[in-house]
Image (cartoon, grey):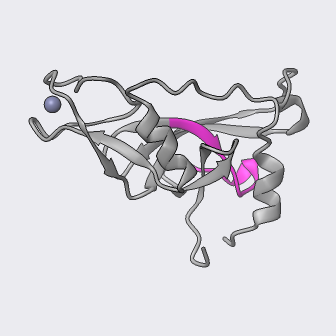
Amino acid sequence: MTFDPAAIAAQTVIEGRNLPRLETWSRPYWEATGRGELLLQHCAHCGAWQFYPRPLCTTCGEVPEWEVASGRGAVHTFTVIRQNRSAPFKELGPYVVAMIDLAEGPRMMTNLVGCEVDDVEIGMPVQVHFVAADDEIALPFWRPVTSDA
Ligand SMILES: [Zn+2]
């Protein structure tokens, strides 16, 4: 499979999406997306990883630290949305909503892009792909692992 930036651009329409509100505990995550980094929370006290960002470790209640994640994972499950009448999704055509098992352990819901919807498979190795949303942040999408990018 090859990396096709034009195909990905057609699948990652940003205009019209509701963007996240940056809270005290989520601001580091979103600011990192703007730098092209995927951060996860890791608890130095108990070793747990977590996503999405929260003020406290959900396992032990300590304040978690931020670590740069590998940006790699695998498709846990997915569905193909063939009709969504809400903007901006009605312009996309069929698209994939997937749950990704991150290499570090947490699971992330996302749009899987960069391939035909019928080519997506459970267990498929994927990598994160950032698309700028404004001057500050980017949105993480995931795409099949390719050898050329
Ligand atoms: Zn903990």
Q: Residue at x 57, y 24 (%)?
A: 21
| Corner quadrant of residue 72 | bottom left
In the displayed structure, 59 sits above or below 65; it is above
Give the residues in magenta: 109-121
Q: Residue at x 31, y 43 (%)?
A: 105
Q: Residue at x 84, y 27 (%)?
A: 83
Residue 53: x and y in percent read 38, 30
Dividing the image into four quarters, tell me where ligand 1 lies.
top left
Is residue 35 shown left or right of residue 12?
Answer: left
In the displayed structure, 144 sits above or below 122; it is below
In this view, the residue in front, 127 or 125, is: 127
Residue 49 visible = yes
Is residue 44 shown left or right of residue 92?
Answer: left
Residue 76 visible = no
Is residue 65 shown left or right of residue 101?
Answer: left
| Residue 101 inside the magenta-drawn segment | no
Quadrant of the image containing the N terminus = bottom right
Give the residue at the far bottom of this rendering. Answer: 148
Give the residue at the far left of this rendering. Answer: 45
Residue 27: x and y in percent read 45, 34
Residue 129: x and y in percent read 60, 55
In the displayed structure, 66 sits above or below 59; it is below
Residue 60: x and y in percent read 13, 24
Quadrant of the image containing the C terminus = bottom right
Q: Residue at x 86, y 25 (%)?
A: 87
| Corner quadrant of residue 82 | top right
